[in-house]
C-alpha cells in the first residue's frame, strides 16, 4: 500500500492518512490482518510529527477499521457486517450532495458518479460478479 499526503492541502494530514487507509480497505488493497506501517516510520517517511499519524490511526481504531496493540502494531480488522455506519456518515454524505447541487450538478450526474465510485471498490466488484 502506498500512501500519499499533500502537505499543502486544506485537508489535515491525519485526515488524508485516514481517508487513504479507508480507500485501500474498500479497494481490497488492505484486507483483514494487513499490517500498517508503524506510526514513527510513517511519520518519518512523510516528515511529519508521529502524533499526526497516531491521530489518524486512533480515528481508524475508533471506527473499528483497525486494531492497535503493542505486539502487532496497527492491523486491519475484519469488516463487521452488523456494525452501523458512523453517525456522521449521513451528515458527511449530505454535505457532499449539497455541494454538488449548489454547483449545479444534476441528480443524474451525481448518481452516475456515486455508482461509478461504488463499483470501483473491491467488495462492490465482488457483488457484481455473483
Image: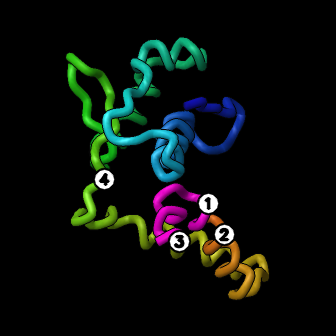
Tell me which numbered mark, 3 or 1, is placed earlier along the sequence: 1
Which numbered disc covers residue 116? Answer: 2
Label 1: few (<14), some or many (≥20) within 10 Å? few
Q: Is residue 114 above or below residue 58?
A: below
Report the magenta residues as a range. Answer: 118-130
Which numbered disc covers residue 79? Answer: 4
* Residue 78 seen in this snapshot: yes
Tell me which numbered mark, 4 or 1, is placed earlier along the sequence: 4
Apparent side of residue 115 relative to residue 91 in the rendered image (left or right) = right
Label 4: few (<14), some or many (≥20) within 10 Å? few
Image quadrant where residue 70 sits:
top left
Q: Are marks 2 and 1 in contact (CB under 8 Å)?
A: yes
Residue 43 percent location from the top left of the image:
50, 18
- Quote the CA–CA distance across marks 4 and 1: 18 Å
Residue 38 percent location from the top left of the image:
40, 18
The answer to if 69 sits in the magenta stretch is no
**Viewer-proximal residue among 4 and 81:** 81
Amino acid at each position: 500500500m502506498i500512501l500519499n499526503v499533500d502537505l499543502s492541502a486544506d485537508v489535515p494530514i491525519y485526515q488524508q492518512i485516514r481517508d487513504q487507509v479507508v480507500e485501500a480497505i474498500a479497494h481490497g488493497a488492505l484486507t483483514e490482518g494487513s499490517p500498517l506501517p508503524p506510526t514513527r516510520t510513517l511519520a518519518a517517511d512523510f516528515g511529519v510529527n508521529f502524533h499526526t499519524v497516531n491521530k489518524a490511526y486512533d480515528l481508524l481504531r475508533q471506527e473499528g477499521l483497525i486494531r492497535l496493540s503493542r505486539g502487532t502494531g496497527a492491523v486491519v480488522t475484519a469488516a463487521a457486517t452488523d456494525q452501523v455506519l458512523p453517525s456522521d456518515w449521513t451528515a458527511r454524505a449530505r454535505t457532499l450532495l449539497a455541494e454538488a447541487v449548489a454547483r449545479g450538478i444534476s441528480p443524474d450526474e451525481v448518481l452516475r458518479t456515486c455508482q461509478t465510485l461504488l463499483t470501483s471498490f473491491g467488495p462492490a466488484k465482488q457483488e457484481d460478479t455473483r
